[in-house]
Image: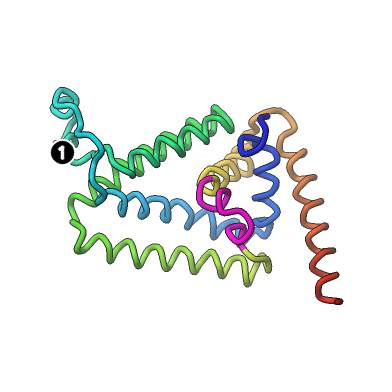
Amino acid sequence: MGKGIFDLEKNFAQYGAYHNNKTNIIIHTIFVWPILFTTLLLLYFTPPFIPIPPLLATALPFSLGNILLLNFGFVSVIIYAFFYICLDVVSGTLASILLVACWVGSSILGDALEFSLAWKVISVCQVVCWCAQFVGHGVFEKRAPALLDNLVQAFLMAPFFVLLEVLLKLFRYEPYPGFGTRVQKVIDYNISEWKKTNKYKKST
């Protein structure tokens, strides 16, 4: 376990306190990664910092050397992958592979659609996905989303935490023995404290 932003147990417990309802968890599992994908699709249209080296470009299949751009989308993938691997090597590596797949896929899609059509696809997807998550919080979780309290967690950590939650619940994967039990205790405590505070605010 690390400290601060790299403290996996603390950060996952904080995320879990905002995503404890089963329906809300399913909603986030479905819609978080499409938000990331379409964000990368938007970033595909940012100018590259440097061109793909000619030798690498010719070695890539399907003319990907002319499609994959070393731009803000690429930099975002590197930053996200770095954080995820620092949090947990195994699940972080899996998340990084998915990130690269999203980057490649969004680049191919961006090249095929071009900006005039891509921004429409991006807009529709983003609106639908964000609305679904707000419904998840408002109707099922009955708690405001984490982005109102922790922007870093909402935008940087959310894709990783969604993946880790799937690995925990469906495949019983734990970054270290006892992780799930320890985190659930913290989640339960955080929720109980939030309920006490919320109840106090309503009574005053």
Q: Local crowd at mark 1 within 10 Å, few (<14), some, or many (≥20)? A: some
Q: Please, is residue 37 above or below residue 54 in the view?
A: below
Which residue is tagged 1? 66
Q: Is residue 99 left or right of residue 88?
A: left
Q: Is residue 204 magenta?
A: no
Q: Quadrant of residue 185?
A: top right
* Foreground residue among 150 and 91: 150
Q: Which SS type dominates the magenta stretch?
A: helix
Residue depicted at x 33% and y 61%: 122
Q: Is residue 155 magenta?
A: yes
- Mark 1 residue type: Asn
Residue depicted at x 34% and y 49%: 40
First to last magenta residue range? 145-156
Residue depicted at x 71% and y 39%: 180
Residue positioned most to the top:
55
- Is disc 1 placed on a helix, strand or loop? helix
Residue depicted at x 29% and y 45%: 105
* Foreground residue among 21 and 51: 51
Q: Is residue 133 left or right of residue 110?
A: right
Q: Please, is residue 35 above or below residue 161 in the view?
A: below
